[in-house]
Amino acid sequence: MNVVTERLPESQVVLDITTDEQEFEKALERAYRKVVQQVRLPGFRPGKAPRRIVEQLLGREILIEQADRDLLDPLYQQALEREDLRPVSDPDVEIYQAEPLAFKVTVQVYPTVEPGNYQGVRVEPRHVEVTDEQVDEAVARLRSQQSPWEEPAEPRPAQEGDRVTLDVEVKEGDQEFRAPLKDGVFTLGQDTLLPALREAILGMNVGDERDVPITFAEDDEQAEPDMRGKTLDYHLTLKKIEEQHLIDLDDEFANKASNGRATTVEGLRDDLRRSLLESERQKARNEVGGEVVNALGEVATVELPAALIERQIDTEIENLRTHLSQSHGQTLEAHLRLENKTQEQLREELRAEATRRLRNSLVLREIATREGVSVGPQDVDAEIDRLLGPEADPNLRQVYSGNYIRELLENELFERALMDRVIAIATEERGAFEPPAEPEAEAAESEEAAPAAEGGETPIGEAAAATEGEAAAGEDVGERPVAAAEGEAAEAEPVEAAPAADVEPDEAPAPGVTGL
């Protein structure tokens, strides 16, 4: 077999594969033995007709076609191995000579990544501090979260800060625009209600009803797509008013609010200051890490194959589908109908960001190889011990020892180690934030239940407690969305150290070319 390789843009490769005479003759003999078992020729027992008779009666072309079919895939796989190529798409095959077989295969392959002068990338650490005002605000949030809501002693109109329960009907003309909302709960001034609705509720008494017409402009980006350019009639019925009575800021509150970690108000403030500091450090790490990753992508050279980009977009869409389902109870199809767009349009909107993610991920993987970043089973064992502690329930430890969770932990540790390394390079070992954490403080903080400074991890399956705000009911009565579904995780998400899509080459054989 002879192979001539031609590289094309976007990580495409053309393999010109030609068999030699001896190799093709052996394939013809194998083809004859296969064909002769499948046909019945007059005067011969099945499988006993000589080859020359088969060629005379059936035509030599039958054997050539069978030989070509038998050779295509093995020769293609051998050519991939010989040229050290890892395909990421199905091959496009052109047979331009039947005897001896000669054909061209065009295929997209795993790209070559040249990270360039990644050691020269420089990023400044972020200055991190927590002010007394931030601590005061955190204390106030805790008091608000744990203080009871009660109906006023004497009937009065709704006012700013009240929690109200109401029914809402929305119509467009005489037609129902949305299903009625029953017993929706909102905190006035702390919700995402449309301003016109909030203004209408202020001053209402329990039992009052009020009609509120609202006209939405065609270009109102804060309104939901199906509301733009319409006038909707809201009918409000106020059913309950509650006011909040803040509990005393004393040592008893401090002990309860800190889950026993603090016994005094000052101890609570110190506990909150540590938690806020860790949050600020993690925020700084994400910001610096994102800046580093983008800078590394700019100095690198990568020709992305179209197949990998499409696969990455598939992953982004599935992530969006999961987010919509879990956070909003909505299907992707329903979301697209509300946005008045097709899935093809969504794919194009996601293409640039998906390409950036994919490019950065490939660059980071190459840097990880060059820098010797790796995670072994012993690292995963140590992480499990750290998460569970020495006296963990054996059954829980058994769960964490399963392949699924170990793989999750291994990926997390790898991404963390890789991000630590590139941040160290880009900041000349200064780290993502300054002033740096004191070693004694870091060791003490890692023992607490709060997320660690650099990793921010919590045991898998543990629910993260909300620190502020309440989930207001009634998204479908005209609340302003906090963020668009596609983009709301972008700012807070960890810096990507590995692609969301499966961009690693498969260990299984490459897609074949048989049957063509």
Image (tube, grey):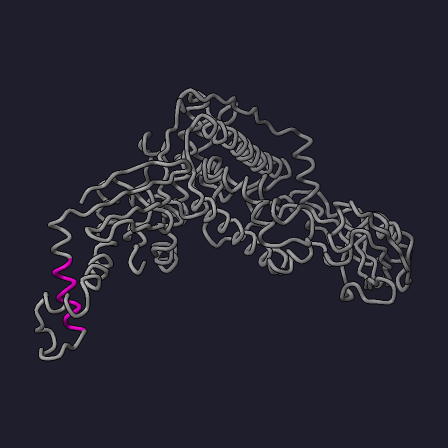
Q: Camera-side residue: 160 or 93?
A: 93
- In the image as oriented, which residue stretches furthest toward the front? 56
Say which residue appears at 78% left-offset and 45% top-offset: 219
Relative vertical location of residue 374 with respect to residue 216 in this rendering, above or below: above
Task: Please say whether residue 437 is visible from this viewpoint.
Answer: no
Residue 52: horizontal and vertical position, in percent?
10, 65
What secondary structure characterizes most of the magenta part?
helix
Image quadrant in which the N terminus is located = top left
Q: Nearer the viewer, residue 355 or 305?
A: 305
* Image position, residue 366 (x, y; %): 36, 34
Q: Identify the residue at image location x=76%, y=49%.
A: 223
Instruction: Where is residue 222? Give x, y as percent.
Output: 75, 46
Q: In screen coordinates, is 26 left or right of 238?
A: left
In the image, is residue 140 above or below residue 459? above
Instruction: Name the image quarter holding residue 54.
Output: bottom left
Which of the pair 282/79 is nearer the observer?
79
Residue 60 screen position, x and y as percent = 18, 62
Q: Residue at x 72, y 47 (%)?
A: 144
Instruction: Assess whether residue 199 is covered by the magenta stretch.
Output: no
Q: Quadrant of the C terminus?
A: bottom left
Range covered by the magenta-colored residues:
28-38
Using the image as rendered, state which of residue 146 and residue 483 is in the foreground: 483
Give left or right: position of 513 versus 211: left
**Residue 481 visible, this orientation:** yes
